[in-house]
Amino acid sequence: MNTDFDHFKLKIDWKPSAYHGFTVRKSVSQSLWKKIRLEVLKNNQNTCSICGYKPSEEIDLKRLHVHEVEEYGESELICTLKGLNLICVKCHAFHHLGRTFGTLNKDQIEDLMNHFTAVNNCMEQDFKEYYRFVRDQKRQNAPSILELLETFNEEDTVKFFIDGNIPYKEDVISQLKKKGLYREIENKRPISEHFVRYILKGEKFNFNDFKTQEEWDNYTADLEEYVKSKKSDKK
Ligand SMILES: [Zn+2]
Ligand SMILES: [Zn+2]
């Protein structure tokens, strides 16, 4: 597989057509999204996380967009929100490529192309090769029309799952749930290895085995779950 483009800071992407028009932003209230946007701006010091653009005038803050980093279900219409990135309008254009370029004139496209080659320190030719590479990969991974038809029979609309830390996450989930647009996906974290050793295998507990806070958190979470299930067994 060609990975010559891995080092590009500014990646290109576009949404599968089945997901067009469906975003968490459009599914929650405008007032909630406003609060989220302010938080994302603050957390990123009003700076594009890709090219470093930082507006000097208040009015230009609108040139900073909150991009929803998404993953798409292969067999079901589930859109997983992985996080929110603050990026400038130009970098953003490359994340929704099909939609963007269709509406631009020659000068605007040239402007964007200059941005791409400057941020990635590459030639326009590299953009073309990269574009073909991404397009071919997407074609390979795209579900067939027949699979899509099946999908539409089962689920008539895109549902969301939030996997990642975003501001006001609980509020977002509760609004999505109220609209029936939230789809819980079971936690994919594998069972804690410490839990397996101490509880299931009966090894001697040693606090020094824990290297990170996360290992500890996973262990205690699994332990709590285990204690709960034991209690309900007894009833
Ligand atoms: Zn940028
Ligand atoms: Zn976006």
Image: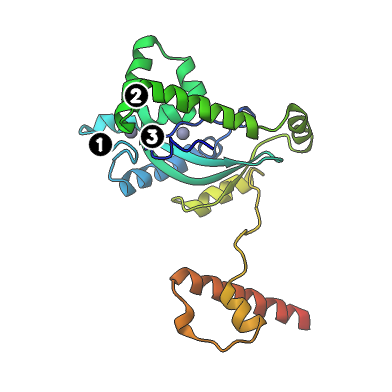
In the image, residue 228 lies at what x, y percent? 67, 77
Q: Could you give the CA–CA distance between mark 1 and mark 3, rounded to whole angstroms?
A: 16 Å
Which numbered tag is attached to residue 23?
A: none
Q: Which mark is residue 10?
A: 3
Q: Do we see residue 72 in this rendering?
A: yes
Q: Residue furthest bottom?
A: 204
- Circle 2 or circle 1, nearest the eye: 2
Colour approach in the figure: rainbow
Secondary element at image label 2? loop
In the rendered view, tell whether residue 57 sits above or below residue 36.
above
Closest to the observer, 82 or 143 = 143
In the rendered structure, which amino acid carries the disc numbered 3?
A: Leu
Mark 1, residue position: 54
Q: Is residue 182 above or below residue 113?
A: below
Q: Label 2, on which residue?
A: 123
Quadrant location of the C terminus in the rendered image: bottom right
Q: Is residue 228 above or below residue 173?
A: below
Instruction: Tell me: residue 224, above or below residue 77.
Output: below
Q: Residue at x 36, y 36 (%)?
A: 87
Residue at x 34%, y 32% (from the top left corner): 120
Q: Residue at the spot x=72%, y=81% of the render?
A: 230
- Circle 1 packing at 10 Å, graded few (<14), some (14-19), many (20+), is some
3D distance between C-alphas at marks 3 and 2:
13 Å
Q: Position of residue 56 (x, y in %)?
A: 20, 34
Q: Answer yes or no: do the residues labelled 3 and 2 have beta carbons within 8 Å?
A: no
Image depth: mark 1 or mark 3 in front: 3
Some atom of ligand 1 lies within 8 Å of the CB belonging to the residue at label 3: yes
